[in-house]
Image: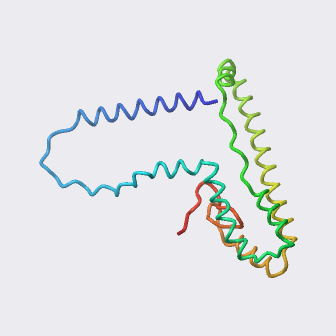
């Protein structure tokens, strides 16, 4: 599965290196020209912050933080706490799929191109079925929780759900997709 990407990455890297070599050899000495202002440097820990997104403990803390505000706005009664707990538990993102093991990659390498295409198609269908099941679970959880709300709470819930494009930070208890805009 990863072999075509590996070949593409190798080809791209070779192209970039060739371009850099050509550019370096074509350089001529020119009079000093003021350099264009460089982009502001990122904080030293920027990469570390990005990596923290994959820390399960920090992800749980962010989820709890994202859920606290909508919960407060809904002003849930003690009788509704169980419905909230069930709702938020069902809204948890699915676990990330594991990468192919070396053994699985070796098996894929033994396949002919048509066999590999068929195998990849089957794996993709399986992943799509799992994703659809996960989305259905979330939809059902939302409907069940919504049914437990009173009329005023439903208005609050609806206002949190509408007017938000895909990827926007919003909605009840979660922050959108990969392109989520973090408004601060």
Residue 106 in the image, given as x and y percentages of width and height:
65, 20
Q: Furthest residue to the front?
A: 78
Q: In the visual, does 97 lie left or right of 153? A: left
Q: In the visual, does 1 lie left or right of 137? A: left
Q: Is residue 16 placed above or below 170 in the rendered structure?
A: above
Q: In the visual, does 150 lie left or right of 121? A: right
Q: Nearer the viewer, residue 45 or 124?
A: 45
Quarter of the image holding residue 64? bottom right
Q: Furthest residue to the bottom?
A: 152
Quarter of the image holding residue 123? top right
Q: Is residue 27 placed above or below 78 in the rendered structure?
A: above
Q: In the visual, does 79 lie left or right of 73? A: right
- Residue at 21 percent across and 38 percent down: it is 27
- Residue at 78 percent across and 38 percent down: it is 126
Q: Is residue 127 placed above or below 114 in the rendered structure?
A: below
Residue 55 in the image, given as x and y percentages of width and height:
60, 48
Residue 72 in the image, given as x and y percentages of width and height:
71, 74
Residue 62 in the image, given as x and y percentages of width and height:
62, 59
In which quadrant is the N terminus drawn? top right
- Residue at 78 percent across and 54 percent down: it is 135
Please state the total of marks drawn on the protein image. Answer: 0
Model colouring:
rainbow
Q: Nearer the viewer, residue 64 or 176?
A: 64
Quarter of the image holding residue 74? bottom right
Q: Nearer the viewer, residue 109 or 138?
A: 138
């Amino acid at each position: 599965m990863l072999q075509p990407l590996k070949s593409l990455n190798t080809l791209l890297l070779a192209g970039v290196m060739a371009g850099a070599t050509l550019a370096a050899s074509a350089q001529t000495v020119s009079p000093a020209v003021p350099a264009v202002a460089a982009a502001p440097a990122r904080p030293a820990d920027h990469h570390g912050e990005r990596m923290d997104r994959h820390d399960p403990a920090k992800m749980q803390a962010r989820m709890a933080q994202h859920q606290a505000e909508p919960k407060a706005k809904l002003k849930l009664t003690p009788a509704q706490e169980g419905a909230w707990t069930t709702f938020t538990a069902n809204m948890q993102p699915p676990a990330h799929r594991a990468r192919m093991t070396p053994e699985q990659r070796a098996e894929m390498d033994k396949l002919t191109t048509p066999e590999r295409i068929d195998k990849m198609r089957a794996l993709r269908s399986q992943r799509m079925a799992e994703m659809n099941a996960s989305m259905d679970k979330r939809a059902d959880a939302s409907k069940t929780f919504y049914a437990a709300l009173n009329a005023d709470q439903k208005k609050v819930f609806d206002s949190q759900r509408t007017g938000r494009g895909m990827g926007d930070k919003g909605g009840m208890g979660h922050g959108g997709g990969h392109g989520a805009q973090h408004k601060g």
